[in-house]
Amino acid sequence: MSEKKLAIIATKGTLDWGYPPFILASTAAALGYEVEIFFTFYGLQLLKKDMNLQVTSLGNPGMPMPMPMPVLLQALPGMQSMMTSMMKKKMANKGVADLSMLRELSQEAEVKFIACQMTVDLFDMEQSEFIDGIEYAGAAAFFEFAGEADVSLFI
């Protein structure tokens, strides 16, 4: 029996959306899957050396709030920083691993990270901004793997 494969496309670059690709990838790798994550558009933020990610409740009505808060208040300056601080504190209190630790764990588990070369070029990013151990390729290269994957996820 051949090894199962998981293909993930990561498109989001916020603190809350950074967790799913790394949790799913590291879990699948621990279960014996061959895993590749294709980071494109804002998902490239997850590969930066300095992962200064934020979270916002704007556009995310499912985000649990400590108290009801009108959308207008959520848009005030400083609210995104406050929300990010609250989320990081809650995660630490609940024992949730830091995002950079999950990313490192994924790499140690031999999850292959692919940065979308087109997006890197589009946003004038430099390879020096990114962590070591990643590949740069286009969508066609990722589709070679994804086309054979048992599970494909778009996050």
Image (cartoon, helix red, strand yellow):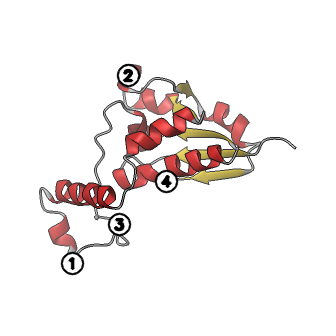
* Residue highlighted by disc 1: 67
Q: Nearer the viewer, residue 146 or 5?
A: 5
The earlier-in-sequence mark between 4 and 3 is 4
Q: Residues within 10 Å of mark 1 (few under 14, many from 20)?
A: few
Question: Could you tell me how far apart the alpha carbons at marks 3 and 1 are, in whole angstroms?
Answer: 15 Å
In the rendered image of this protein, does residue 148 appear above or below residue 127? below
Residue at the extreme right of the image, as rendered: 1
Q: Seen in the image, is 105 located left or right of residue 35?
A: left
Q: Report the quarter where the N terminus lies.
A: top right
Residue 14 percent coordinates (x, y): 35, 50
Residue at 42%, 31% in the rendered image: 122
Question: Could you tell me how far apart the alpha carbons at marks 4 and 1 are, in whole angstroms?
Answer: 26 Å
* Residue highlighted by disc 4: 20
Q: Nearer the viewer, residue 142 or 110?
A: 110
Provide the secondary structure element on which disc 3 rests. Answer: loop
The earlier-in-sequence mark between 2 and 4 is 4
* Residue highlighted by disc 3: 60
Q: Seen in the image, is 50 located left or right of residue 70?
A: right
Provide the secondary structure element on which disc 2 rests. Answer: loop
Residue 111 percent coordinates (x, y): 59, 36
The earlier-in-sequence mark between 4 and 1 is 4
Residue 66 percent coordinates (x, y): 23, 74
